[in-house]
Image (cartoon, rainbow, N blue to C red):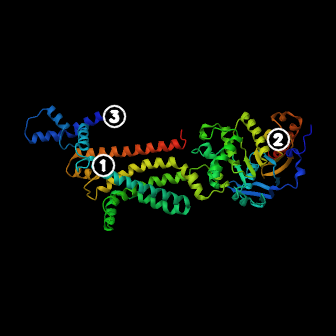
Amino acid sequence: MPKPSHSTFDEPVADHAPRRLVVDAQNISLTFDTADGRVEALSDVNLQVAEGEFVSFIGPSGCGKTTMLRVIADLQQPSSGTLTVNGMSAEAARLARNYGYVFQAPALFPWRTIEKNLKLPLEIMGYSEIEQQQRVEHYLSMVNLTGFDRKFPWQLSGGMQQRVSIARALSFDPALLLMDEPFGALDEIVRDHLNEQLLQLWKSTGKTVLFVTHSIPEAVFLSTRIVVMSPRPGRIIDVIDCHFPADRSLEVRETPEFLKVAQRVRNGLRAGHSYDE
Amino acid sequence: MVLALVAIWYVAAVAMNWSLVRDGFEREETPYTISDVLAGTMEAERPLLPAPHQIATAFLDSVFGYPPLAPRSLIYHSLVTLSATLLGFVLGALFGIVLALLILHSRVLERSLLPWIICSQMVPVLALAPIFIVVLGALGLHGLLPKSIISAYLCFFPITIGMVKGFASPDPLQLELMRTWSATPRQVLWKLRWPASVPYLFASLKVAVSISLIGAIVAELPTGAEAGIGARLLSGSYYGQTVQLWSALVAAAVLSSGLIALIGLIERAVGRRMGVH
């Protein structure tokens, strides 16, 4: 059944060409000098991400997917290439607090309650007390953690802590959400559940999401576009568009279309690896 | 355990005081039996090693036997030393923390300051204390302050070492989060480094407080102070008043364990507020 056309996320990305670019990376390269010699973490990476997209980076460890995210976040500087984030340099975007970053570990501040953890970026950015309180309530309910505001992080499970860290990244309403294997340390069941919640969140907020993972089903389930990367040197070897209905549930993973996309991702990963062994 | 120690002490007291008491009897040419000597070792007026009950009686007597502010009251002397200790402790803690901040702030300072700090602790304070007192006396400083300065001089060291470690203790992810929120260095200090170093602070405060008590006592020795635990120790050893010497030692021990216990209590209260479990 074709859905009504005003459901934005069902449309192919090609139709959105005129939409504003949130990330525009051209010929990004990054080399480290380590004790074992020179490592090419990123080699000539080109990537354009439009507003509202959900882009996953997938690849084996060492392929530079996390490095790419860190470069966009201005946590690392590329050796060469040009990069704009929200139409400005990555550093300017960071200083303007244009993105929220979610790490693999929740990295909550253990001496702060959940409420205080959510307030931390807001305090730093100088929001008023009332505004802080409203946002805490809003974003806690968004990640289904209402009523946990007075708890300390250690009183929450790993999945709950990661939801707090997602709420924290959203709390100052950045246009861009950068997520570095946010569910990598969680078990399969919790991960499935959080995938569904994240999809809901993305639909309701319309944020642009860049998402690093090494799970194929996760990437295919969540993304509008999948960037397949391979290591040594870290580069993009395939970009796969993927458009499942916006109201998809986890069952979509059993459909032939889903398996076909997953197959293509797997082939890409295998091709990237072939000359390695 | 404690009983065994007390038993050993009694045996040692008998052994060490034996010849002293026997000589006493022989000098006076009075006949004596072994049990007379044995009794004598337990209540000699100036024993080499006073028996525990002698120390206990003398201690209780000098604590409760006089009005608190009488010059023979141990409470009075303890208060004199305590005030120098507390002032020195506060000064030393502040100085230690400021020094740690400076070291955190610049690697160059660390390399140039640390050798001096370590040197300062290698000079025996017993040699340094008279110099301090004389110099400060020439500057017109008498009484409490010179003692406190010597005490601060001794106790800042563990605090500096502890706090340098504490300020550097935050997780790299937490530091990167602060960076993604473009927090100012001051915000990083107050919202991350300072709370993260609280466990280190209390550990080093406990070490520092007993050192600062020792500093205050040592400072009383070369000055010929009329009051304070150090003064009691000094006059005790001048006049061979071993019982007085020992009860002053007990007072110092009680004082320092009381101070450590107090810091422990504050640590627990702070810990509860910071979600320590």
Front of the two marks 2 and 3 = 2
Say what secondary structure mark 3 lies in. Answer: helix
Q: Is residue A45 visible?
A: no
Residue density around tag 1, few if under 14, some if 14–19, many if 20 or more, within 10 Å: many
Q: Residue furthest front?
A: A130
Residue A22 place in picture, x, y as percent:
79, 55
Front-lying residue, B128 or A1: A1
Asked if badges 1 and 3 are on one and the same chain, I answer yes
The three-letter amino acid code for the residue at tag 3 is: Val
Residue bearing mark 3: B2
Q: Earlier in the sequence, mark 1 or mark 3?
A: 3
Q: Give me the chain letter of mark 1.
A: B
Residue positioned most to the bottom: B139
Q: Is residue A55 left or right of residue A100?
A: right
Q: CA distance from mark 1 to mark 3?
A: 25 Å
The quarter in which the C terminus of chain B is drawn is top right
* Chain letter belonging to callout 3: B
Residue topped by disc 1: B78
Amino acid carrying mark 1 in the image? Ser
Name the subunit of mark 2.
A
